[in-house]
Amino acid sequence: MRDFVMPPAAFDERDMGTPAREGAPVTLTIDGFAVTVPAGTSVMRAAAEAGIQVPKLCATDSVEAFGSCRLCAVEIEGRRGAPASCTTPVAPGMVVHTQTAKLRKLRKGVMELYISDHPLDCLTCAANGDCELQDMAGAVGLRDVRYKAPAEGGLANHFAPREASGAANPQWIPKDESNPYFTYDPAKCIVCSRCVRACEEVQGTFALTIEGRGFDSRVSFGARKDNALASDCVSCGACVQACPTATLQEKSIIELGTPERSVITTCAYCGVGCSFKAEMQGDTLVRMTPWKHGKANRGHSCVKGRFAWGYATHKDRILSPMIRDRIDEPWREVGWEEAISFAANRLRGLQETYGKKSIGVITSSRCTNEEAYLVQKLARAVFGNNNTDTCARVCHSPTGYGLGQTFGTSAGTQDFDSVEHTDVVIVIGANPTDGHPVFASRLKKRLRKGAKLIVIDPRRIDLVKSAHIGAAHHLPLRPGTNVAVVTALAHVIVTEGLMDEAFIRERCDWDEFQVYAEFVSDPRHGPEATELLTGVPAAELRAAARTFATGGNGSIYYGLGVTEHSQGSTTVMAIANLAMLTGNIGRKGVGVNPLRGQNNVQGSCDMGSFPHELPGYRHVKNPEVRDVFRQAWGVEIDPEPGLRIPNMLDAAVEGEFRGLYCQGEDILQSDPDTHHVAAGLGAMDCVIVHDLFLNETANYAHVFLPGSTFLEKDGTFTNAERRINRVRKVMAPRNGYADWEITQMLANAMGGGWSYTHPSQIMDEIAATTPSFSGVDYALLEEKGSVQWPCNEAHPEGTPLMHVDGFVRGKGRFIVTEYVATDERTGPRFPLLLTTGRILSQYNVGAQTRRTANVVWHQEDVLEIHPHDAETRGVKDGDWVRLASRSGETALRAQVTDRVSPGVVYTTFHHPETQANVITTDYSDWATNCPEYKVTAVQVSPSNGPTGWQRDYAEQAAQSRRILAAE
Amino acid sequence: MSPDKMVHMANQIAAFFKTQPGGKAAERVAAHLRDFWEPRMREQLRRHVEQGGRGLDQAVIEAAPLLR
Ligand code: SF4
Ligand code: SF4
Ligand code: SF4
Ligand code: FES
């Protein structure tokens, strides 16, 4: 694909033809220039390194060369013929010529053949100006095409619907427009197979094949009758990216035309943090393409980041501020000044009447670091309390606690590149192909090269078995027994003597290890003893433990299936123990890697959003830390921890907490026990919702401040590998202000006296106050593209791998992890266990993705139930069922599948109509109050449609969303 | 916070620290509560203990006086 604006010179955007190699240097001569490249590099890439572009069609640097088009032929002294430069590796002393009379003739002939079977409607083609076939016709100097259709008909081409005689052309296949985001037009295909290779090598889905041979060969989505939408295709866009022609083409480009400039930015969906080029026409976004220098994604993307950005201009977006005195009144649109002063007066009034601690904030894991920093600063410096929390409370707070206790820092230990060096991987409580798709593609690539996989999950997730990969072991545990399973793995490793004693002696506290070893060696932790409880066959668990301990570099990736439990923090510690036990910390290919849900979960935690700690994970009780901020902000910091989200809601019900500023979060939909959340919100006197849409929480709000999208502001996101990526403004905020400006207006209306004019100044303040960020500024990010914290004097370019020479806390600490059963138990009334998750095409509560064409893949939440459980209840596939727990009940459709074990049911929570959180309870992680989403005792029974509560709720929501027409 | 919920949460914390080697469960529970519970929540817990501490684990009851 061609580029429009060259980013900084350090980032070479050219297509080098074939992938980079690592190897000993080899020197050769190309067109008289000496070039030195790593052994294994293709002649084509070596030429590109020297600035010489060899014409090519079937090669591109995202996939391995295939050597089918022959356009890249070169002459090599001492070798016969004209070998393809894309498939010929360099050799020392080789002398290559890329332009000779013989080659010119050969290439012209090749192009002539291609063009003879290609429609000549370039001027009206969507790829006009962005087509490699066009470029190559120009590059080889093609001037005319001598092939003509034989006079007696039989056109023998693929592009004309009808032959000269008027008969239908059997070779012609109509355009496939079934995918909402791109089209496949077989008439324009040159069968270079770049798309097929991209789907296999980059994405790992194997949805595309080349069917037939010779002239009959065609690209196909699985079986011939399958269209793109019905196929296995997950709409990642890798094939579209790789296609040199308009055959696979984004619909947005067909509609709007090609872009004229591009800006590098970061996806605002998940914690992988993919880098993208936002391609623009004026201030209209026409396409997002993955940026090949993005270090998290290395040029790959998923359907959300690549295509699902239409919500930014969705008609539901609210663009002017609104207020109302009571939540049963309709909204009144007002100017910014009025809304801000209304909010500020109410909040100050509440503090005067009910005390300083009667109000608080919730920062967002979707907003930038700079915005999260300002929101917690608003609480601490302007409200004068520590009532700040973040939605990370409900996902990864146990990661912070658990890794802090064992390693001394609250973050994953690796970068994503590390997966290329791993030999055995444990994926526990995560479903990367859906939740973290680009990471999953990178993992699958490694698995196809032979790394082994152990999946610990109640459900048979896609990674357990899919095209060309599979798990060596799947441990389908009962929800809620993570600690028992991970401790049993440690039991096997210790009792069978498979631990890495040298590592433990050198890097960990040996005395603590002794105590721990004695603890895990107790037969009650053995897999045979825990089998009954966990449902995991002992032999399989033993085999998995041996594989992990003896298989080479071992890495652990985990998600919310670990944290969202009563023992979430304990499981995180158990995972850390396992990594230390096997010496899998401190180098490439190993480590403990939390997969973060939302784009900036890591960042919002780093920025001091939690009520007990200031930016950089420093407890508010430490006077020297408070002093840093006292000096920076000129106010005393409260030394006592503030309220966490569930505590805020509890206090609200009791009348002690009356006002909330909630940025970019929909706690009514995303937090557990909806009835309790609604009661808490309903009891408050001033709820300020700052968001893109009238979300569910806004039904209880008094002030609505319209937010800006990631396309409309500058800032940074920090992904799951601690990588600080730039978010760049590509268009003006449609609501008038970037979110950091809105927080600043509110702070100033309450006497904050802030005067930031650009987010870079906020980052400077973060760097000045927070040691792990002290080296970070926008100039560095501009130069490097991104950096991983800690970034400071000791690590001026950031830290890809943590704990390399020693743990942050000094010696690694083994912690005893006793299994404690959750109090959420099945019984006669609620005999099944419900666990929850997410799917690829939707994101979290779905506020964004539901407002894009992604709904074609997931129109509603469904309940997965095992055939056995379905049958005993008289439930058939597609039936409406009632799902009830001790908290509440809802109704949704059933999907009968053996992906879940008997006794377990599963659903997602992307749609507000379902309200899966009406079901979840208020049980939570013992250390952090992270809710126990992953285990709820439920009953399932047939039903004939939505529950009364769902209908009432829809009614109430419609009422509270009324907006008065402007006078 | 409803007393039941408070008791449940406090007992969960005790359940963890009681399993840790080296004893001192009450001290550790108190330290955890001081670090993570807002003063009003700690106060509510102390009052509950003063009124007999119904439902609370012994380690929590012993931790309460340390919360002053
Ligand atoms: S969009 Fe992705 S999954 Fe679909 S065919 Fe293309 S490469 Fe394969
Ligand atoms: S669809 Fe595009 S990439 Fe695939 S074979 Fe055809 S021209 Fe090549
Ligand atoms: S949603 Fe995640 S994996 Fe997909 S493009 Fe965005 S950051 Fe990448
Ligand atoms: S580019 Fe080398 S054979 Fe096609």
Image: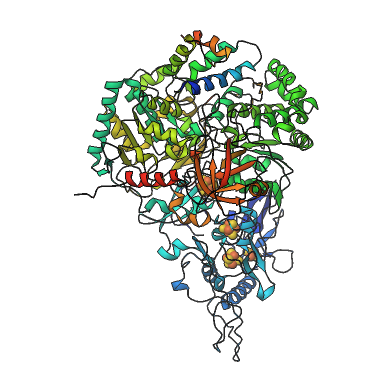
In the rendered image, residue A729, in percent from the top left (x then y), is placed at 38, 46
In the rendered image, residue A964, in percent from the top left (x then y), is placed at 25, 47
**Residue A583, quarter of picture:** top right
**How many numbered badges does the structure rendering display?**
0
In the rendered image, residue A417, in percent from the top left (x then y), is placed at 61, 42
Horizontal arrangement in the rendering, residue A333 relative to residue A286 (left or right): left
**Residue A752, quarter of picture:** top left
Viewer-closest of A610 and A648: A648
Q: Outermost residue toward the left?
A: A967
Q: In which quarter of the image is ligand 1?
A: bottom right
Q: Outermost residue toward the right?
A: A496
Image height of A925 relative to A276, above or below = above
Q: In percent of the image, x 34 and y 23: which residue is there?
A: A358
Q: In percent of the image, x 49 and y 11: which residue is there?
A: B49
In the rendered image, residue A277, in percent from the top left (x then y), is placed at 47, 51
Horizontal arrangement in the rendering, residue A901 relative to residue A274 (left or right): right
